[in-house]
Image (tube, helix red, strand yellow):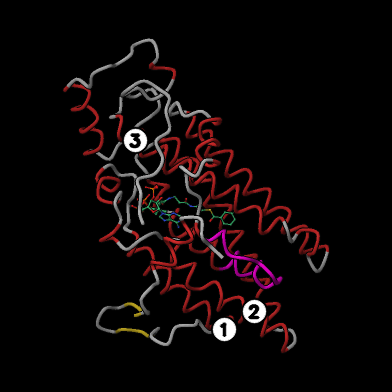
Amino acid sequence: MYTQGLDIPGGEPGAGNSAAKGKPQTTEPAELQADFDAKMAADRKIEPQDWMPEAYRKTLIRQISQHDHSEIVGMLPEGNWISRAPSLKRKAILLAKVQDEGGHGLYLSSAAETLNASRDDMIDALQTGKAKYFSIFNYSTPTWAAVGVIGWLVDGAAIMNQIPLCRCSYGPYARAMIRICKEESFHQRQGLELLLNMMQGTEAQRAMVQEAVNRWWRPVLMMFGPPDAESVHSSQAQAWGIKRISNDDLRQKFIDAAVQQAEVLGVGFPDPDLKWNAERGHHDFCAIDWDEFWNVVGGNGP
Ligand code: BYC
């Protein structure tokens, strides 16, 4: 069941960061709102010192802090493989990637702090279950191939979702995303290259890759969030220029790109309905089990 999530306290209504602290705004005067609306209409960035509606600030804190938690929690399944990586080269690559994820968490918590969110409050919200992290990190990584699949598909999906966030209306979040996306493309490539190597190896290695793809494909599609019709935050987030492309459109773009990469790799996806639809100009795919998604988000994952 969906319940409305995070509500991090802190800050003054309508104020971005401490630069605005000297002039508290207890009301939201029409001129300030009009100025904000004009910036939105002109597609200009909102900066921490600018007045912003309280709901805009809270939406950003919810999304940025959840993004931050996803980066940090995402270090756990991969970090677990550092001491088990099959060669020095793979260990060095994985170490660098996991460190990058920690850095992403740092850029994002810094961006949230410009909105007057404190790290203590954000961590408290995670630990008390008020804040979420990406559902995907509840799935297990029992084989080395899963590490490659995280890079290829999980980071691949993350890039698809994060590229439009580089144009987010809130300056500090948009700028953090530019650097994060550059690093994510290395993450995606190292996963693809790891899997390509395994696919050129033994029969057992190829089977291990296919098994990992089979287990991760559907959960990866859930990363883009619920279908547009059930996405409670989308319309407001799109009106505010936080989200630029809808959950369903990003999911479709990702599937179309992944099918081509799977051909290069020589793996299949576990979906009998996956086929090119010339009329739509996209691949059709089978229905996603959203009950599983909400169960995992609700803490009842595998
Ligand atoms: N998992 O109205 P909606 C990485 C929640 S890290 C869990 O569509 P919104 C990596 C959503 O929060 C990359 N929950 O929401 C790291 C909301 O619940 P609340 C992380 C999800 O915000 C290390 C409810 O469902 N990237 O790749 O408009 C190693 C309704 O959804 C999920 C980001 O965080 C999910 N997948 O859109 C390797 C990207 N999806 O908050 C890899 C930034 C939805 O009301 N975030 N929910 O309690 C976003 O772009 C947007 O927040 C989303 C959701 C597209 C995810």
CA separation in Å, label 3 and label 1: 42 Å
Between tags 3 and 2, which lies in front? 2
Residue nearest the viewer, comparing 14 with 134: 134
Q: From the viewer's perspective, is residue 72 above or below residue 117?
A: below
Q: Which quarter of the figure has residue 48?
A: top left
Q: Are marks 1 and 2 in contact (CB under 8 Å)?
A: yes
Amino acid found under the numbered disc labelled 1: Val
- Residue 151 among magenta residues: yes
Residue 45: assigned label: 3
Q: In the image, residue 180 lies at what x, y percent?
A: 54, 48
Q: Residue at x 30, y 34 (%)?
A: 55
Q: In the image, residue 91 lies at what x, y percent?
A: 78, 60
Give the residues in magenta.
136-152
Residue annotated with mark 1: 267
Q: Which quarter of the figure has residue 254?
A: bottom left
Position of 10 with respect to 189 (left or right) is left
Q: Which of marks 2 and 1 precedes in the sequence?
A: 2
Residue annotated with mark 2: 209
Q: Residues within 10 Å of mark 1 (few under 14, many from 20)?
A: some
Q: Which of marks 1 and 3 precedes in the sequence?
A: 3
Task: Give the main secondary structure of the magenta stretch.
Answer: helix
Position of 236 with respect to 210 (left or right) is left
Q: In the image, residue 131 lies at what x, y percent?
A: 47, 43
CA separation in Å, label 1 and label 2: 8 Å
